Image (spheres, grey):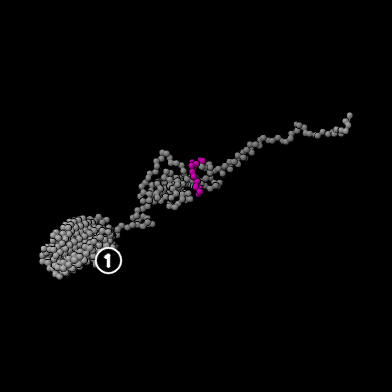
Amino acid sequence: LPLPNRPPPIAYAPVPSAPISEPVAAPRDKRSSPVILAVILTGVAIVALFLGRDLIANLFGGRKNGVTTPAGDVVDKSPAEPNRPAPPITPSTDGTGATGSNPGTGASVNTGTENPANDPGSRPIATPVVAPHTNQPPAPTPIAVPRENPPATPPGTNPNTNPPATSTQAPPTPSVTPPATSTTNPERPVTPPPAASTTLGAQIVVSAAGDGQFRTLEEALKAHYDSGATQRRTITMTSGTYRLPADLVLHTPLEIVGQGNVILQGSGSKAAISVRLPGITLKDLTITSSAQYGLLVVGSGAVTIQNCTITNNREAALAITESGSAIGSNCTLSGANFGAISDGGSEGNLTNCTITGNGIGVQARASSTIRLTGGTVARNRQSGMLVSTGGTISASGVMIADNGGNGATARSGRITLNGGTITNNAQFGLRCESAAGVIDRTGVSLVGNKMGDTEGCP
């Protein structure tokens, strides 16, 4: 019986359903799976063939230690073989250090080993270029010819941006900088030998005008000394003014002769010309000097002066010292504190010379000797002659005139006069300043000396 106030139950119709044994989908054919797998593997192989070729080439080409430059070149970075000896170090033959297997001063400032030429420990290698990505098989690796002397990187070249060029041919033989005198390199100036070094004879001609073998005395002397100076030579200098090298020293048998008006201008701290060994002759020259001496003869030096004028504005026109000797004839000595001065065991012999315009004309001291024959000692600012500390002067037929002090003064030493005239000197003709100073005279004429002919002399 239905309950009160409750609706009657609702009846539902049954829902039809498929039998449990009815299949929902058709079963797969298991035989199609190997075909799909083969297609996938084929695709992977194709991709690997195109995209992994470089990797395969590196793995199987022995370049796993390589470094690829921006241009695609592969450079061997492998260490040197342990059993391979280090490349020999070849001394430089051209001063650049670029010979052998060691890079020289011509290498780039960037000395990294990116460029094998800058790595002295690396082996000579070829530098092939990686082939472009095409369907063609990779190009065969070119066979390299080992270099025993790799060229240095040119100055200013960066090996990272300038890789070595690839070539399948043998590299050119590295060049060696030729010596300065080589004629095989037209781009390098050739330094010729001295102009006449191979044609020097017994006589050399120097001409400032350029029509001789040499233009300067310095060039001629260099050629003379470079030749070995085995024979006595005459250097003939044509008219002109020549500047001497400072403190020129002559030390081998030599004759220097002027033709015409030849002026030699000397300078330096010591002397315009110094003579240290015997056998030097100066003839027909005018020598001017701003050095301490005009012509200095020192040591065992010996010089012959003929028809020369020597002017110096400092100590002495002619100075002879130690055991040196000088023989002069028809020469003029002027402008210095002393026209001629000697000391030590030196000796001077002057014939028909004019000694004028100096502080003192001639002075001998310290056991040295000066002999005058003929000529004039005149117009010097002080005495014409002076001996001191045991020096000796002997004069024969000499005129001593117009000097600002005495004609001859013996302070300590001896003056011997034979003939000649002593005249018109501002003070005494002859003066002996002490008992150690002696003046001997024979046949001397004393005339017109302002303060008297003699003073203190017996």
- Where, by quadrant of the figure, is residue 216 drawn? bottom left
Residue 217, horizontal then vertical, whole percent = 27, 61
Amino acid under label 1? Gly
| Extent of the magenta region | 59-72
Check the image and name the residue furthest to the bottom: 448
Check the image and name the residue furthest to the top: 1
Residue 62 lies within the magenta run: yes
> How many numbered circles are shown?
1
Question: Mostly what secondary structure, the magenta segment?
Answer: loop
* Whether residue 303 is visible: no
Residue 284 lies within the magenta run: no
The residue that appears at 33% across and 57% down in the rendered structure is 191
Q: Nearer the viewer, residue 308 or 401?
A: 401
Q: Nearer the viewer, residue 386 or 42?
A: 386
* Whether residue 73 is visible: yes
- Placement of the N terminus among the 4 image quadrants: top right
Q: Which residue is mark 1?
A: 240
- Placement of the C terminus among the 4 image quadrants: bottom left
The residue that appears at 43% across and 52% down in the rendered structure is 155
The residue that appears at 24% across and 58% down in the rendered structure is 274
Q: Nearer the viewer, residue 174 or 88?
A: 88
Residue 226, horizontal then vertical, whole percent = 27, 56
Q: Is residue 212 left or right of residue 177?
A: left
- Where, by quadrant of the figure, is residue 182 drawn? bottom left
Q: Nearer the viewer, residue 404 or 377?
A: 404
Residue 88, horizontal then vertical, whole percent = 38, 44
Q: Dot 1: few (<14), some (14–19), or many (≥20) neighbours within 10 Å?
A: some
Residue 115, horizontal then vertical, whole percent = 45, 47
